[in-house]
Amino acid sequence: MDRALFRRVTNGIFVGACGLATLIALTALVLILWSLITKGIGGLELKVFTESQPAPGSEGGLANAIVGSILMCGLGMVIALVVGILAGTWLAEYGGQTTYGHVVRFLNDVLLSAPSILVGLFVYELLVAPFHGFSAYAGAVALAILATPIVTRTTEDILALQPNALREAGMALGASRAFVIRSIIWKAARTGLVTGGLLGFARISGETAPLLFTSLGNQFMNTHMSQPMASLPTTIFQFALSAYDDWQRLAWVGALLIAIAVLSINIIGRILARETHR
Amino acid sequence: MTALAVSETSIKPRNAWGETLFRAACFSAATLLMAALAGVVISLVIGGWPAFKTFGFGFFTSSEWNPVTEVYGAAGPIVGTLITAFLSLVVALPLALGVAVFLVEFCPKPIANPIGVAVELLAGIPSIVYGMWGLFVFAPWFAQHVQLPLVMNAEPGSWMDKLFSGVPNGANIFTASMILAIMILPYMSAVFRELFMTVPAQVREAAYGLGCTPFEVIRSIIVPYVSKGVIGVIMLGLGRALGETMAVTFIIGNAHGFPHSIFDSGSTIASTIANEFTEATGEMHTAALVALGLVLFLITFAVLAVARLLLRGQKH
């Protein structure tokens, strides 16, 4: 074959293959969302939000799991925001260029993608085994450990984007460094910090593995953090692998709810992120 | 950022206490992060020690996992973890490269961003949703339309028969790997996209100026330009695949011991822990599971560390 033609054909095949790869990825997204909607939307009724989980064969909802998820993610997020923003601030404003800073940044990156089930094991050894009991506190701590690296990372990135002139202006007025960071830099970076929080929240609200042996799950409505507590992901896990049709239907409803929540948090985070970069 | 040209000792702010306190708080938060990672390692070593002590090196080589006789060998889950991670990488890598190249080079600008966001939304879908979809939608379809025909047409005793044998219910190592591939694809393509955008326009245009086709530009200029980063992304994807828990737990079939074909059910380290930990029968069972966790940690830590080191060099 003539060389020019051969090169044109190779190129054409390559472009086609790249397009096909994109098409496959998009098809996967559409197929998954389609299954979620068709299998989940039918069971989406008011009682899902108002009633607790049923015994197989009777009527009920997911209220206890939804409440549990909100409580544990909420507490986990509070811890993650406090630790993550402070740690990110230290990396960006104080010690980020020291050897210690490089080590912290590196280990934070590793923690960011460490398997979540190992975090569950760690919290089990730390908070469950010594106190002889599963608790929602342990679940919240496990979730916090997963969200903190994300918050730290985005905080550092967003603070690094703030112009140095801003810091110098504050200090020229006689403000201390801590005051400049808290009242000027954090304010200027507000949207970015919120984005980091949202991304962390999106990550932990669908997490199942670290909750399996920290908060365990609970078939009743419970708001005491010192006791085992249900959560949407663990309840879905239990229901989906059960042999009962109505439990499996509820699992799909739960999966739809979680997917809607996570995807909308993700999209809001993205919109906010785009605005800060503008 | 820290190099402000103000000598701090010469200034005595009014609230020197506040400054010290705030700085200390930030420093402790950063230290706490390290402590968390150190805590993971220490707790796994302590918790898993009895298993290592009892079974020694046999823990890694034996595939007998029997809670009744209290004999634990982790070869099955370890091999299962490596096979699923590797298979998913083989599938996800070309796809992720394709998506990234398509979005950076060929896609019309106005739709490149929406498509990019849609692909990244795949990364946002929780693992448990992938698991349910895999078990209730993908696995039955796969068993019906791929596995059965393959098994039926394979001559008994041939290499195909050996490779494809297994219960045709779709819950096996291969389908688990495919779901894993879909899960790591968006992470990899997002980083590939960032990498490709760091290639200077002049380099790219110079190659086009020589008359290269887009394929030649990508193969000979762009990919070599970011080659270290490409390996970093591969490691990153591998790290994700190794530690993924819930989706795999749903569809791998959860059988102990050595998998005999790619359509055989198996288990991974993470799925074994997720399935058995709360129901562990005795102290040795728990210790064996924690020891498995330590093995997983060491593998992923090594992989992720290499990934981060390679990617660091590429970041501007």
Image: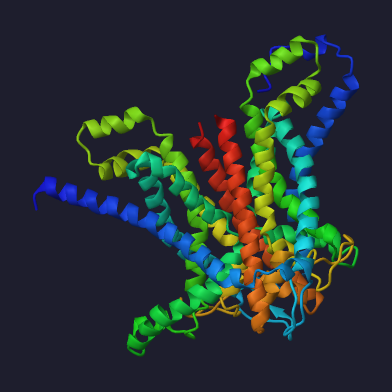
Classify A236 as above or below A172: below
- Residue drawn at (27%, 42%) of the image: B214
Quadrant assignment, res B154: bottom left
Please say if A257 is above or below B35.
below
**Residue visible at 79% across and 61% down?**
A67
Residue lying furthest bottom: B156
**Residue B223 in the figure: left or right of residue A91:** left
Query: Foreground residue, B157 or B88?
Result: B88
> Dividing the picture into quarters, in which one does residue B26 lie?
top right
Q: Is residue B295 above or below residue B38?
A: below
The correct choice, above or below, for A63 with respect to A1 in the image is below
* Horizontal and vertical percent position of residue B183: 52, 59
* Image x and y of residue A118, in percent: 70, 60
In which quadrant will I find the C terminus of chain A? top right
Quadrant in the rendering for residue B193: top left
Q: Residue furthest front?
A: A46
Viewer-proximal residue among A1 and B312: A1
What's the residue at 12%, 45% (across, down)? A4
Q: Is residue B291 visible?
A: no
What residue is rendered at 81% in x and 28% in y? B23
